[in-house]
């Protein structure tokens, strides 16, 4: 087994050790807030230039102050945590963790409902399992925030949620209960459903449901109560999409699918995040003109099917074009079911993307795209105290996440 695969699949004490540690440390809202000072030779605040010999003060679950050791004194009574590099807690902008579990068996695979190809009313909040060992596994590598939920592979598979990687219940983990509605165009839909069988049919089915939702919204405002339609969960959710209350997370990999998604957005006026975007370089000017932001496929994704044109340089191409993007873990069919965004960002940095831009793609830019940047994604006073302390450059695979802090509590303190 290679050094990299050893890091990915082994951890001291077994899968549940961290869960037991987490419980003992009191990772629930009722836990007493800690006072912690984090020191780093280099602190990537992601709110400006890196701070050398930096200090972050944490109190009451939030960041109290950030500065250099020469200007920011550590008060008495603060527990001091030190390391070579410090970053904000990492943000995975698109995953299915918590719906897709670690064991690769039917009972913990809840990320895709295959009974119908269009089900935007399905709620990730009703299926998320915060106690799945895969959540703890990711947190051990510094991932503290997830946009997770229903997977690509259906025309409309359901909603996502934004959660922290702590908490014993979904309510304790939750940041945003209705993140985005996941839509998909491409061959994965045909693989999962008998209908649609072609791309044209797929788009016609989506358009048909959006037209119905628009009509449903009009009829709901009828003066005569007898003419108002009864409750319809699907139409209600699509109505929220059409009103711009909920964004669409549109998975499209080929240039043709990307352009179709942009046309649908133009026709119906919904807010959209482009997801996957394997062939983005072929239509990069059209994406830029649209103003749409991108959650890019995993840099090291497998190049087959709709992703056969994958390139490790796409992140750098998006950056050069001035398109805001994040790098995601996505979904894998093998244990441990997901990738580690830290490693995906590192490969992007080795293929034309600057190191700070790579970190931004899994911290502040990811937080902005999923709409939680007021709380996470950078180290600034008043934000949630989510931090990762590394024993070396975070984008070198020989480095380790040695301390992870979420909501001001040390959740992991073993180098991984």
Image: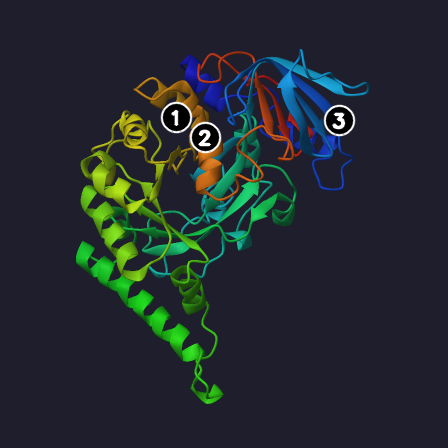
Question: Disc 2 to disc 1, how far (Cα)?
Answer: 9 Å
Q: Does 90 sit left or right of 270 as displayed?
A: right
Say whether disc 3 or disc 1 marks the residue closer to the N-terminus.
Answer: 3
Say whether disc 2 or disc 1 marks the residue closer to the N-terminus.
Answer: 1
How packed mark 1 is, by other alpha carbons closer than 10 Å (few <14, some 14-19, many 20 or more), is many
How packed mark 2 is, by other alpha carbons closer than 10 Å (few <14, some 14-19, many 20 or more), is many
Say whether disc 3 or disc 2 marks the residue closer to the N-terminus.
Answer: 3
Q: Quadrant of the C terminus?
A: top right
Q: Does 256 sit left or right of 326 as displayed?
A: left
Residue on which disc 1 sits: 344
**SS at mark 1 in the image:** helix
Which image quarter: residue 14?
Answer: top right
Residue on which disc 2 sits: 362
Q: Say which of marks 3 and 1 sits in front.
A: 3
Q: Does 205 sit left or right of 132 as displayed?
A: left
- Label 2–label 1 contact, CB within 8 A: yes
Question: Disc 3 to disc 1, how far (Cα)?
Answer: 33 Å
Question: Disc 3 to disc 2, how far (Cα)?
Answer: 26 Å
The residue sitting at the right extreme is: 77
Residue located at (51% from left, 53% from top) = 178
Residue on which disc 3 sits: 35
Scheme by which the image is coloured: rainbow
How packed mark 3 is, by other alpha carbons closer than 10 Å (few <14, some 14-19, many 20 or more), is many
Q: Is residue 365 above or below residue 84?
A: below
**SS at mark 3 in the image:** strand
Residue located at (48% from left, 18% from top) = 7
Q: Quadrant of the N terminus?
A: top left
Q: Is residue 144 above or below residue 398?
A: below
């Amino acid at each position: 087994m290679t050094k990299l695969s050893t890091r990915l699949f082994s951890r001291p004490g077994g899968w549940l050790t961290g869960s037991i540690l987490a419980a003992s440390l009191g990772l629930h809202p009722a836990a007493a807030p800690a006072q912690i000072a984090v020191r780093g030779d280099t602190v990537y605040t992601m709110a400006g230039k890196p701070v050398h010999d930096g200090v972050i003060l944490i109190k009451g679950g939030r960041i109290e102050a950030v500065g250099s050791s020469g200007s920011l004194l550590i008060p008495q009574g603060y527990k001091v945590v030190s390391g070579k590099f410090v970053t904000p807690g990492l943000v995975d902008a698109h995953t299915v963790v918590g719906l897709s579990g670690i064991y690769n068996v039917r009972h913990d695979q809840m990320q895709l409902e295959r009974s119908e190809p269009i089900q935007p009313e399905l709620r990730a909040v009703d299926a998320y399992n915060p106690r799945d060992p895969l959540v703890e596994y990711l947190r051990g590598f510094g991932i503290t925030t997830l946009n997770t939920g229903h997977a690509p592979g259906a025309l409309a598979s359901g909603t996502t949620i934004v959660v922290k990687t702590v908490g014993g219940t979904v309510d304790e983990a939750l940041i945003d209960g209705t993140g985005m509605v996941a839509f998909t165009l491409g061959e994965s839909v045909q693989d999962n459903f008998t209908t649609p069988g072609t791309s044209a049919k797929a788009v016609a089915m989506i358009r048909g449901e959006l037209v119905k939702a628009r009509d449903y919204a009009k009829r709901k405002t009828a003066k005569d109560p007898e003419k108002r339609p009864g409750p319809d969960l699907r139409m209600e959710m699509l109505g929220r999409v059409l009103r711009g209350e909920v964004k669409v997370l549109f998975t499209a990999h080929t240039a043709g699918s990307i352009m179709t998604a942009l046309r649908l957005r133009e026709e119906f006026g919904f807010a959209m995040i482009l997801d996957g975007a394997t062939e983005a370089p072929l239509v990069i000017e059209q994406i830029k003109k649209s103003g749409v932001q991108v959650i890019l496929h995993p840099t090291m994704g497998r190049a087959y099917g709709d992703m056969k044109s994958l390139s490790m340089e796409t992140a750098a191409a998006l950056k050069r074009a001035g398109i805001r993007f994040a790098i995601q873990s996505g979904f894998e069919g093998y244990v441990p079911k997901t990738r580690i965004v830290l490693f995906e960002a590192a490969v992007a940095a080795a293929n034309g993307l600057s190191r700070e831009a790579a970190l931004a793609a899994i911290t502040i830019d990811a937080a902005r795209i999923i709409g939680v940047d007021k709380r996470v994604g950078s180290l600034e006073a008043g934000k949630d105290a989510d931090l990762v302390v590394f024993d070396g450059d975070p984008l070198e695979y020989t480095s380790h996440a040695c301390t992870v802090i979420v909501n001001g509590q040390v959740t992991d303190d073993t180098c991984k």
